[in-house]
Image: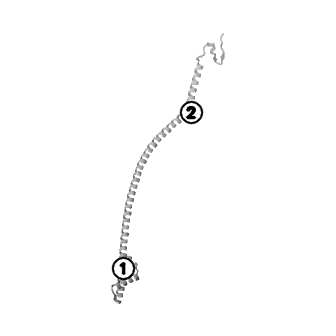
Amino acid sequence: MTNLVQYGNTFSLLATGRIFGLDKQLLVDVCFQGIAIFILFAFLSYILFEPVKKMLNNRKEKVQNDLETAAANKEEALKLKETYDAKMKEVDKEAEEILSNARKKALKRENDIVEEAKEEAARILARANNEIQLEKNKLQDEIKVEIVKVAAVMAGKMVKMQMDESMQNALIQDTLKEMGDDTWLSK
């Protein structure tokens, strides 16, 4: 008794005692499935893999460009930093030079001011000495005039009366009292 169970054109493998049987239909099915898988793979690679590859390549190029741009920016930043440092050194030198010049000018101006003040003080002192000398001369002239007046008054009184020496001394004393002691004491 054969346990043949027919399912369409295919006989059950149980009848032959094999689990896997190679027949033409199986080969054709395997070929069709292989072709279908290949077509499916080609279709999927065109639909899915190519865009993913393209996206990955674009991303890779973008990352590479970003890295190159970053390297270029870094190099440019280093150059700018060097330029900045050089300019800062120049600015520091210029600032020091300006401060040095300002100090020199200030010292020169200070010396000029001190010199002018000394000259002005000397002029004021000379003018004051001049005025003092003029006042002395004026006072001496006034004293001479007073002495002449006193002498004239005394001579007039002596002429009026001829007197002895004690009378002359008394006359001088009276004249001095009339003129006042302040006239003779202030010089």
Is residue 117 at least partly visible in the picture? yes
Does 126 appear above or below 38?
Answer: below
Q: Position of residue 24 (x, y in %)?
A: 58, 19
Q: Position of residue 103 (x, y in %)?
A: 39, 57
Q: Position of residue 72 (x, y in %)?
A: 45, 42
Q: Which residue is mark 1?
A: 143
Return the disc, 1 or 2, that comes first in the chain's sequence: 2
| Amino acid of disc 2 | Leu
Does 92 appear above or below 37?
Answer: below
Give how far apart the Cα atoms at labels 1 and 2 are: 135 Å
Callout 2: 10 Å neighbours few (<14), some, many (20+)?
few
Callout 1: 10 Å neighbours few (<14), some, many (20+)?
some
Q: Which residue is mark 2?
A: 48
Residue 52, labelled with which disc?
Answer: none
| Amino acid of disc 1 | Ile
Q: Quadrant of residue 11?
A: top right
Does 17 appear above or below 89?
Answer: above
Given residues 35 and 136, the one toward you in this image is: 136
Given residues 6 and 127, the one toward you in this image is: 127
Q: Quadrant of residue 184?
A: bottom left
The secondary element bearing badge 1 is classed as helix
Residue positioned 37% across, 69% down in the render? 125
Q: What residue occupies the far top of the structure in this picture?
A: 1
Residue positioned 54% across, 34% down in the render? 52
Please give left or right for residue 46 compared with residue 124 in the image. Answer: right
Q: What is the basis of the colouring in this image? A: one colour
Is residue 151 at least partly visible in the picture? no
Q: Position of residue 179 (x, y in %)?
A: 40, 82
Viewer-nearest of discs 1 and 2 = 1
Q: Quadrant of the C terminus?
A: bottom left
